[in-house]
Image (cartoon, grey):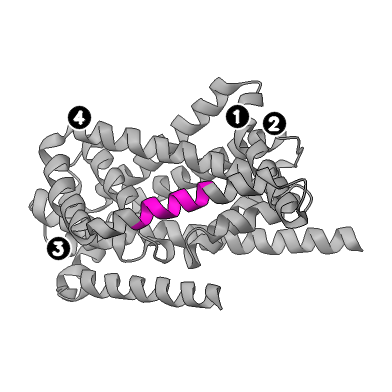
Amino acid sequence: MNKTVKYILSFALAALLVWIAFRSVDWKAFLEGLRLTRWGYVVPFLVASVVALVLRTTRWRDLLKSAGHEVPWIRVWDSHNVGNLANVALPGSGEFIRCGYVVGKSGYGDAFGTAMLERAWDVAAVIVMIILALVLDRGKFGPFFVEQVWTPLSGRLSFSLWWLVALLLVMLVLFFWAVFRFRERNGICRKVADAVSSVGRGFVSFGKLPHKGLFLLYTVLIWMMYLLMCFCILKAVPELSGLGMEDALFFTAVGNIASVIPVPGGIGAYHYLVALSVSTLYGGSWETGLLFATLQHEMHAILIIVLGVISYVALNLRSRNQRA
């Protein structure tokens, strides 16, 4: 029941944001922009997307290995793709699903810990990217972030809500203290503590990596691919083709801010923020901003869906052959 409610609320929010983004679109101008799109730039965009996925797979496999799980690269690739496919439908669900596929029940906690570690590094990379955008282009990004993101968000978060968040954190700390305090006397506490410890082992797997510099290199290259993807789509849209890598950094930072809004695959949130930034900061039309956002988001989504379906079929075929 809870999953059903989450799906309904997530899709309802996505539908609302899509409607807000597209409600006043001049469809004639939008379709004309689509006709003038330089589709040749979509090819390097897709290549960079695949390279980023390959690097992510290799990075995760190294973490799994350091956590004590030697998994074939192709299985990690397929599990990661299926997880990405699930995230298109419901943000966050892919992390749970990919861990189940990659190691099964026996090592699920370790795998989930490595997935959380990956996400922690991604959050750090996003923070670095936002800081770079502020430093290199603070005249655009700073005012935009404050006026269009932080002020509306902080205006909606009442003082009482912050107290509620603080109370929940205190309750969470007390819960884990009780679990580990009474793990020897209570069977439920013991199971919860063992599960938390397993996740913790996966999370600290970075410390066991033999080549930490290689892990950091993978992370830098992954985000360079994301930057290149954004740059390619800027070049694909004639009205934005004069923008450079610094502007690609700005839009990548904006896109990652949109990604924290819990809607399926970022649908709507990304389109709205990108179209807003193009129309308010770069003097472009709302339609141009939506065209840029749609090309980048939907091309990547199509790639994720295609690879996810192929990997799902491959995983099930291999599982069936193993049982046979």
Q: In this view, does 38 lie above or below 120?
A: below
Q: How far apart are marks 4 and 1 (CA)?
A: 30 Å
Label 4–label 2 contact, CB within 8 A: no
Q: Distance between the residues labelled 4 and 3?
A: 26 Å
Q: In this view, does 30 lie above or below 1?
A: above
Disc 3 vs disc 1: which is toward the camera? 1
- Residue type, numbered disc 3: Trp
Instruction: Give the residue at mark 4.
Output: 135
Instruction: Give the residue at mark 1.
Output: 206
Q: Is 264 situated left or right of 15 in this image?
A: right
Residue 23, position as x, y percentages in the image: 19, 76
Range drawn in magenta: 164-173
Q: How far apart are marks 2 and 3 (CA)?
A: 48 Å
Q: Is 311 situated left or right of 155 in this image?
A: right
Q: Distance between the residues labelled 3 and 1?
A: 44 Å
Of the pair 238 and 74, the residue shown nearer to us: 74
